[in-house]
Amino acid sequence: MPVPSHADVVVLARRPGPSILPGDLAVERRRVRPPGPGEVVVQNVVTSVDPYQLRMLRGSREVAQVDVGDPVPANSVGIVVQSADPGVPAGTQVTTYTGWQAYATTTIGPAEVADPELGGPADWLSVLGPAGITAYVGVHDVGRLRSGEAMLISAATGGVGGVAVQLAKAAGARVIAVAGGRQRIAHAVQVLGADTGLDYRDPAFPDQLREAAGDGIDIYFDNVGGRQLTLALSVLRNFGRAVLCGSVSSYARPDDPAGGADLTEAVFRRITLRGFIVSDYYPARRQPIRAELGAQLSAGKIRAVVTEFPGLDSAPKALATLFDRGGSQLGKRIVRITDG
Ligand code: NAP
């Protein structure tokens, strides 16, 4: 397949403020470097938008640094179109960390070959990708969910939360899903299989949560932090567990004093709070978890829910929607670069 000499790349043009604005990111045409020995050229088909990217673009210390002018880092799934690696021929589907670019020259490790029998590009960015693996690690490796337990999940209709709901149901839990707005909670119950869906924006949410919790929640899968974490702690059983996956409510405004959670209830209820970063689990767990998620996906036990944004130039807008409360985009948000 012919490889163009230049291709589109989305780069950081200036550091964003609390939210992504037009002009923070720019699409540029950059040279596609021919592959050196052991390298390949990948045509990226889809690329990911994720909440951590906002922190990265803003220069937050705890994530990898991106400088002005750099391509935006991201997981992407594509097809090898030119190869100088005999082990990875042209036509191989691969999942790489090559960012928001239409073509990338890179090496391919064994864990980056994306078996098309398990799924297509969108599956490899959602259920089989970091979102699905994060959900699995949070529910099982960290949460140690047991059949019959009650699990509360926030941002339950997003990329991570949507898979977590399905995995928790498949493991025999009672699941209370929290999301923004009627459409999202209907999706959580009717499509993802949650037992109860609650809208955190409803003024009666604290009462509804207490009622839905009944005699207590065993595990809280926290994607949001802030007020929702405070409320969740108040409905956990004594010696319950909180799995701290992310705190998206604070990403746009990390210095907002109203954004912090009150942990007082964790003391009185003797709660174990445990944060995790999915990449710590990659060396030992990525492949077995992918195999299990792939088997569940093929068997129809879980489904990949994806909202696609067309064209690389839609990536900044797609990223910005992650910080909307109660937006219309369900599941994992991805950008389709090409129909390939
Ligand atoms: P997502 O859930 O698909 O999208 C973010 C969702 O968060 C939004 O759709 C919105 O849902 C909710 N939200 C945004 N701003 C909010 C606010 N101010 N208050 C309350 N809810 C808000 O995103 P994702 O990629 O799956 O990520 C979910 C979480 O997992 C994030 O915290 C992310 O950082 C974390 N994560 C952690 C790891 C790890 O290794 N620990 C790996 C991947 C992701 P509603 O419309 O329902 O409000």
Image (spheres, grey):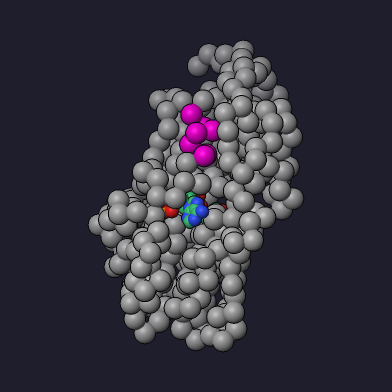
Foreground residue, 155 or 91? 155
Q: Is residue 270 above or below residue 182?
A: below
Where residue 229 appears, x then y in whole percent?
52, 68
Residue at the limit of the structure toward the left, as seen here: 190
Residue 22 sits in quarter? top right
On the rendered structure, is 305 left or right of 80?
left
* In the image, residue 266 lies in the stretch drawn in magenta: no
The residue shown at (59%, 22%) is 27
Residue 56 figure quarter? top right
Give the residues in magenta: 314-320
Q: Residue at x 40, y 45 (%)?
A: 327
Q: Is residue 67 left or right of residue 305?
A: right
Q: Tell me which secondary structure the magenta stretch mostly adopts.
A: helix
Can residue 71 be seen from the camera position used here? no
Report the number of discs: 0
Residue 278 screen position, x and y as percent = 59, 57
Left/right placement of residue 223 relative to residue 171 reads right
Q: Quadrant of residue 88?
A: top right
| 12 and 39: which is toward the camera | 12
Which quadrant does the C terminus fall into? top left
Q: Which sits in the foreground, 103 or 310?
A: 310
**x 42%, y 32%: residue:** 309
Q: List x then y, in percent, for residue 157.
A: 39, 54
- Residue 40, above or below 228: above
Q: Considering only vertical position in the picture, is 165 above or below 294?
A: below
For image coordinates 46% across by 38% down, the residue present is 334
